[in-house]
Each structure stands twice: as C-alpha cells, then as structure tokens.
C-alpha cells in the first residue's frame, strides 16, 4: 500500500534529522540544527499525511477503521507523537539539543515497524473486541503518555551526561546542553504530561475492558505492566518531595520508567505465552 | 516538620512520611512484576507441576500463585492507603490555611528583593492612577483587595486558591478506587456459563473456584451466530438472550462483544462460543433398484423412520462428531419387516475413508453403509449446535471505581495545571509621581507567574505611560 511505502521513506527522514542534530552537537554549528528541524518537520507532516491516507485506504478496502489497531499502526503513531511533542518543546524552549536524543527514538520505532519481518504492515479488519470507541481514546492517550516518557528518557540522559561533564565542560557537545537545573525542571514538566496521559490511558483501557470482557481489571500482564509503569512515575513525582531526591535519582528513575514503558509495549508479548488471556 | 514535637507518636510520624510512600510504591511495583512472571491462577497449575515439592510448598505458602489476591499484597496496598490517609490528615490543615488565609495587602517583605523590572514610575500622582491599576488587575484576578496607608496604597489580588486541594483530590480518588475494588471483591462475583441454543440456565460457575452461583432468574439463549470477514477472521459474535423471572419472560437482549447486556445488576458479556453435535443428522437414502432413489431424511435421535418402499424402519441411535478419528458418523439400526435387526455406522467422509483404507467397508459389516440391501445410507452431515460462552459478572463496586477515575483526572488537572497566584502591588504616591511595584508568589509554575507579571506591567505602562530613566 502507498501509505506504508511513504512511511518507510520517512524512516530515513528521521535518520537525517538525527544525523544533522548530531553534526550540530559535535561541531557546534547552529546551521545544522536548522536543517535537522526542517527534516523533523518534513517527516512529521509526511507522516501525518500517510496516517490519514492509511485511514482512507482502510475505508476503500471496506474495513474502515482508525489506524490504531495493531503493532505496526501503534509504532507509527508512537513515532509520530514523539516528534510532535518534541517539536512543541523545541519551539517553546528554543533549544535543539534534545533533538539528538529524541529523534533516534522516532527513527527506531519507524524502522522497526517498516523493516522488521515480524511486523505486518497490511491493513487488517478489526476483530470484534477492538470495535469500540474506547479503543481510539485509549490508544491516543497511552501513546501520548509513552511519547512523553520517551522524551523524559532523553532529557534524563542529557541530565546525567551534563552532570558527568562537570561544571566547566570543555567540549562543544557538553557546552551546548542546557544547565542541569533547566533539564531537571523540563523533565518534571514532561513527566507530568506523561503521567496524566498514562492515567487517562489506563482509565480508558479499563472502561473498555469492562465493556468488552466484563471486568475493568483482571491483572493480565499488559495491564499489570502499565500499572507498574504508573507506579514508577508516581514515584518520580513523589521523589521530588523528599530532600535530595531531585536530580540524579529522578533522572535514574525516569530511565527505569521508560524501560517499564518499553516492557509494557513489547516485552509483555513474550510473557503472553504463559497467559492465554493476554489480549494485546 | 516543625510540629514533630506536637505529635510525638512514632507511628503517626512514620505513616505521614513520603519516604514510606516511596518504599511502598517500590514494593508494590516489585510484587506486581513478580506476578507477571510467575503464572497466576488458572495458568499456575502446569507451572506448579514443574517445581520440586519444597519450592512448591514455599510458593503456595506465600500465595505466589494468586499473588494479587494474597494477604500480603493486600496488606501492602492497605499500608499505602493508611499512609495516604494519615499523610492527608496531617497536611490538610496546612492546605486549608493557605486556601482560606485572609488577604494581607500591606505586606512589605515581599517587595524586598523583587527584580528592578518589576517596578514602574509614572509622572503623576493623581487618583486616576490607582483606578487604572485596579481595573487592570481586576481584569486578570477576581479577588482584589485594597488598603491605603498614605503615602502608599496596596492592592492584593489572588486566584486559583483551589489549587491547594488538587493533590488531596488525587489522593482521595486513589482511596475511592481501592474502596471500589474492595466492594467488588466482597459483594461481586465473576462467573461464566455456556448455554446451548434453546437452553435455559439459572446459575453460573464462579471463575477459579468452580462453585455455582444462583442468578435469581433464568436466561435462555435463543440464538447464537458468528460471522467472518472474507479472510476468515471473525467479524462478530452475537447471542440473543431472553431473561425469565418466575417462569415469565421479562426481557430480551442481544449480546455482542463490547456490547454486554445487563439484567438485575448482573452483566452478561460475550466471551467465547463453541459447538457440540446436535441431535439430528441429515441422511440420504440411495435405493439400488432399476431407478436409484435419493431421499434426504432429517433423522431425530430414537425416532423410527419408515423406509421409502415399506421394507421396514430405521433409527439413528448415536451421533458422533468424530468417530474412531474418522470424522462425523451416525449409528443406524434398521428394523426390517421380517428378519433380524442390523446396526452399522455411516460415515460422512465415506469416499475419503475408503480411499485411505481400501476395502474397509466390505470387511467390517458394522461399518458398511450398504449392509441393508438394496439401500445405501449416506451421511450428509450432522447438525451441530452452537453454545454461547458468557462471562457473567456482578460488581457493585464499579460505579465507585468510575467515580474515583473521574475524580483522579479532575484532581490531576487541578494539581498540574492550576496554581494559587498571589500578587501584591504597591503604589507609592509622593512628589507628584507614582512608583508602582509588583510582587508575586505562586505555589507552582513560577515561570507562568513571571510571564503574567510582565504582561501586567506591560499593560500598566501602556495605559499610564512610563517615565524614562527614572
Ligand atoms: C498511588 C498512590 C498515589 C498517587 C497516584 C499520588 C499522586 C500524587 C500526585 C499526582 C501528586 C502531585 C505531584 C506534583 O505536584 O508534582 C502528589 C503529591 C503528593 N503526594 Fe501523592 N500520590 C499517591 C500516594 C501518596 C501517599 C501514600 C502519600 C503519603 C505520604 C503521598 C503524599 C504526597 C505528598 C506529600 C505530595 C505533595 C503535596 C504537595 O505538593 O503539597 N502520596 N501525589
């Protein structure tokens, strides 16, 4: 289908964005940053069009549904939300250094979706359990949450790298990074967005489970892992209340949190063998 | 922390600490991780067989096969709830004080170290300056109070006082959700039932415990159907149900996936389906005479059916959906007018079987469909019956949990996106000029407040005019 061809090209656009962000960071030339942002914008718009096209094509096939129904479509949406949130942050903070940490996430998600043999890019009809309006709100909220946590992961890496570099860093890369204080504050704000979205995601998911399976919570691995992720980020929010838990520990917790996100997203499928009722 | 001396109770002190919260959240998270790696409940059986007896006993004693319902997991959640309650009781008075604090317009300390760009000098000292200041503040802040102590006039404005309660709403909702879950586990059940088309049931089986639970009414499955997409994936499952009370029909409902039906507080969900061989088969009779005669007979079990030419009758004794691993078959008994009865099996996949095992039907008269001359019996098919698999649940805690969900979202919005902003504005009027200073405080989002103060100063400058190089 046309949409998946376009999407596979956009993988390279995001790789281009990453490459130019990296050039900017290493050589300290802001012109590279401008090119990188342009790449991001092109990728973002192109991807939005491709997602719209996929939606339209599903109707032409007579099995019309919003493109949020399988692994392929969720990866596509995930990389798109990451870039969307990133562009908003870049625009608000006027700082492009985060790009070098975040664009690889979008690139990898798209590359995995487009080129992994285990992922089917065909438009499939919806099985009965997925025919619910809650599906759309569930997927959108969850993936905005995941994207925010992905960005928080990037910010946490930046924070740790900045702190390792000491107060008076010599190389361009470290000098370009915002101060540790700014990174910490920004990270907190992103986690707040992510936490709110994940909360909404879990809620819409359990309302949906209630209407489809008859119980709003059944401790299946995917549900449980999303709860674990939620607990970790609740921990992040509370850790700021205890003296001395800001900074490094918070960055570390955010990295753990993003690992939980990844496990909720991918890892659970390996557990599914044990649990016949896994319904991802 | 300064009231440690007033509440010396060590229990109280440990339960109001956020440190304990952190420990508990970590423990609950770790426990939950364990539960996703150790098979739980129904899945645990097979896993348990692979453990050696000592480990098995240990696992069992620790409740690791049904962790999320084990006593220690519940104790952890209970401790978190207690932590939450005590922390809230401990801190709420403070939040209430900040919420209801009476305005103190003439605080001077707040102005001590405000940046230079939060001051403004205007070359007039007329009353109209005060009026303008007041209108501009009032356009942004609802509660404005004024206090005059010549030569200065103070304005105090605030908004978003409710912001202090956001966190309490979030924490309260966590408790509400826990309570809702408890109500569900005490007063609800999760059961399932399979109902054959046309059959009526009055109870269901509790999941995991294999105990029947009486519904208090009965439910009949009138029809079950499943449809498929062209590529073979299922498109829709649908059961038509009728509910009876005291033998009287009360309500009909359609249940589809994602569209459950509710009756007397009990909800029925489509969860699975299946077939069992029904009690009728389609049988074709071929009569080897001058002209072969073909008949289709819908043979109900144990009903005698006359042969077309009056040679006798036959009965379908048994219907098997997979006989001797050779597919569907029926056992037929023919009662001729004279002579002995004969019994033989008739297979649906007759052709395939005779290709696979040549001569089998001639060797075993019990398997020979032409055992009664001049007829040959052919099995066209067994009519199978669908049953619908329904999840049957009752959970009176659901509305409580829903309320908790709603509140937690509202609470999070208040916590994260509102802030209690307070502004102090001092207008010092002497020597024919006015000096305006603006100071602000917010419990959250200092950047937002700073932006608002600068906007405000911009508006003041625009309408009052600024004296350059003051
Ligand atoms: C799963 C349970 C919990 C959730 C979801 C939760 C959620 C939250 C959230 C969203 C905030 C706001 C954080 C921020 O503004 O950055 C918060 C703050 C707070 N939480 Fe919790 N919380 C939980 C359990 C607890 C417990 C058990 C305690 C007991 C000590 C606690 C104590 C606090 C305190 C002291 C604050 C700061 C309040 C303030 O800013 O004045 N939390 N909580």
Image (cartoon, coloured by chain):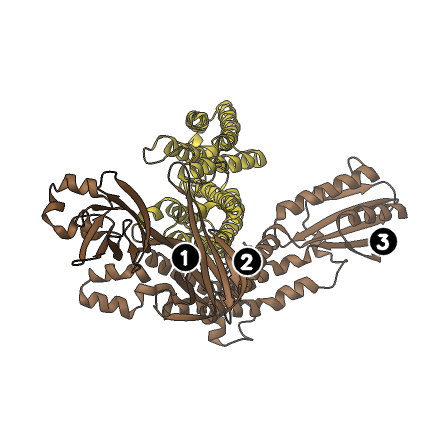
Chain colours: A yellow, B brown
Q: Is residue A150 left or right of residue A196?
A: left
Tell me the subunit letter for badge 1: B
Q: Which residue is mark 1?
A: B197
Helix, strand or loop status at disc 1: loop
Relative to B206, is B102 on the left or the right? right
Asked whether A126 or B72 is in front, the reply is A126
Compared to residue B142, the image places residue A87 above or below, namely above
Q: Gap between marks 3 and 1, in whole Å? A: 91 Å
Using the rendered view, name the quadrant where residue A158 is placed: top left
User: Where residue B107 sits in the image (x, y, percent)?
Assistant: 74, 58
Quadrant where the C terminus of chain B is found in the figure: top right
Which x, y percent locates residue B203? 42, 68
- Please provide percent x and percent y for residue B120: 77, 42
- Residue A24 seen in the current view: no
Q: What label does residue B151 carry, if any? A: 3
| The quarter of the displayed image where residue B402 is located | bottom right
Sooner in the amino-acid sequence: mark 3 or mark 1: 3
Q: Is circle 3 on the same chain as circle 1? A: yes
Circle 2 is placed at which residue position?
B405
From the top left corner, tell me how far across and down residue A32 is, in percent: 48, 23
């Amino acid at each position: 289908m046309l949409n998946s061809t376009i999407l596979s090209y956009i993988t390279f656009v995001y790789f281009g964005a990453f490459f130019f962000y990296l050039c900017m960071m290493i050589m300290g030339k802001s012109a590279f940053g401008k090119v990188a942002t342009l790449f991001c914008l092109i990728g973002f718009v192109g991807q939005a069009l491709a997602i719209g096209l996929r939606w339209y094509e599903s109707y032409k096939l007579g099995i019309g549904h919003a493109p949020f129904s399988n692994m392929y479509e969720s990866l596509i949406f995930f990389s798109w939300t990451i870039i969307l949130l990133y562009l908003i942050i870049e625009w608000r903070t006027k700082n492009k250094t985060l790009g070098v940490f975040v664009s690889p996430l979008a690139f990898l998600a798209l590359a995995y979706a487009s080129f992994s043999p285990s992922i089917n890019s065909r438009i499939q009809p919806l099985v009965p359990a997925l025919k619910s309006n809650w599906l759309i709100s569930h997927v959108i909220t969850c993936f905005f949450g995941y994207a925010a946590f992905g960005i928080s992961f990037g910010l946490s890496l930046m924070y740790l790298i900045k702190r390792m570099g000491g107060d008076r860093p010599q190389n361009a890369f470290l000098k370009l990074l915002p101060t540790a204080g700014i990174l910490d504050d920004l990270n907190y704000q992103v986690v707040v967005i992510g936490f709110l979205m994940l909360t909404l995601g879990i809620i819409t998911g359990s309302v949906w489970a209630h209407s489809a399976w008859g119980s709003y919570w059944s401790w299946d691995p995917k549900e449980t892992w999303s709860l674990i992720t939620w607990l970790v980020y609740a921990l992040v929010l509370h850790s700021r209340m205890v003296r001395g838990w800001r900074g490094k520990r918070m960055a570390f917790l955010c990295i753990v949190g993003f690992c939980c996100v990844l496990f909720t997203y991918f890892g659970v499928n390996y557990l599914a063998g044990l649990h016949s009722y896994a319904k991802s | 922390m300064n009231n440690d001396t007033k509440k010396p109770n060590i229990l109280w002190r440990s339960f109001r600490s956020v440190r304990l919260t952190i420990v508990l959240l970590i423990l609950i998270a770790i426990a939950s991780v364990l539960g996703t790696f150790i098979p739980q409940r129904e899945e645990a059986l097979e896993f348990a067989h692979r453990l050696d007896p000592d480990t098995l006993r240990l696992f069992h004693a620790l409740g690791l096969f049904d962790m999320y319902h084990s006593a220690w997991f519940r104790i952890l959640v209970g401790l978190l709830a207690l932590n939450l309650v005590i922390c809230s009781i401990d801190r709420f008075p403070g939040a209430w004080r900040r919420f209801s604090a009476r305005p103190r317009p003439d605080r001077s300390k707040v102005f001590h170290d405000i940046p230079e760009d939060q001051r403004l000098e205007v070359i007039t000292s007329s009353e109209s300056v005060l009026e303008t200041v007041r209108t501009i503040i009032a356009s942004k802040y609802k509660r404005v109070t004024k206090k005059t102590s010549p030569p200065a006039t103070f304005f105090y404005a605030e908004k978003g006082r409710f912001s202090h309660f956001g966190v309490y709403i979030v924490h309260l909702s966590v408790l509400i959700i826990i309570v809702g879950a408890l109500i569900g586990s005490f007063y609800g059940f999760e059961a399932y039932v399979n109902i054959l088309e046309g059959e009526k049931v009055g109870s269901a089986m509790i999941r995991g415990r294999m105990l029947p639970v009486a519904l208090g009414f009965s439910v009949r499955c009138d029809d079950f159907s499943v449809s498929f997409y062209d590529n073979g994936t299922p498109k829709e499952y649908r059961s038509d149900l009728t509910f009876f009370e005291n033998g009287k029909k009360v309500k009909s409902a359609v249940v589809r996936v994602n569209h459950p039906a509710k009756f007397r507080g009990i909800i029925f969900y489509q969860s699975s389906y299946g077939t069992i061989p029904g009690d009728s088969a389609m049988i074709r009779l071929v009569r080897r005479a001058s002209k072969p005669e073909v008949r289709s007979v819908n043979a109900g079990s144990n009903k005698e059916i006359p042969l077309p030419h009056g040679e006798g009758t036959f009965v379908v004794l048994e219907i098997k959906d997979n006989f001797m691993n050779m597919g569907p078959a029926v056992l037929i008994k023919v009662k001729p007018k004279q002579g002995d009865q004969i019994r033989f099996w008739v297979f649906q996949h007759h052709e395939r079987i005779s290709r696979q095992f040549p001569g089998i039907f001639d060797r075993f008269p019990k398997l020979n469909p032409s055992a009664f001359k001049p007829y040959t019996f052919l099995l066209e098919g067994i009519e199978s019956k669908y049953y619908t698999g329904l999840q049957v649940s009752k959970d009176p805690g659901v509305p409580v949990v829903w309320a908790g969900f709603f509140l937690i979202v509202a609470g999070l919005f208040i916590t994260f996106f509102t802030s209690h902003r307070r502004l102090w504005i001092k207008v010092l009027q002497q020597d024919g000029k006015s000096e305006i200073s603006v100071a602000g405080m917010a419990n959250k989002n200092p950047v937002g407040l700073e932006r608002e103060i600068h906007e405000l100063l911009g508006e003041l400058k625009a309408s009052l005019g600024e004296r350059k190089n003051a």
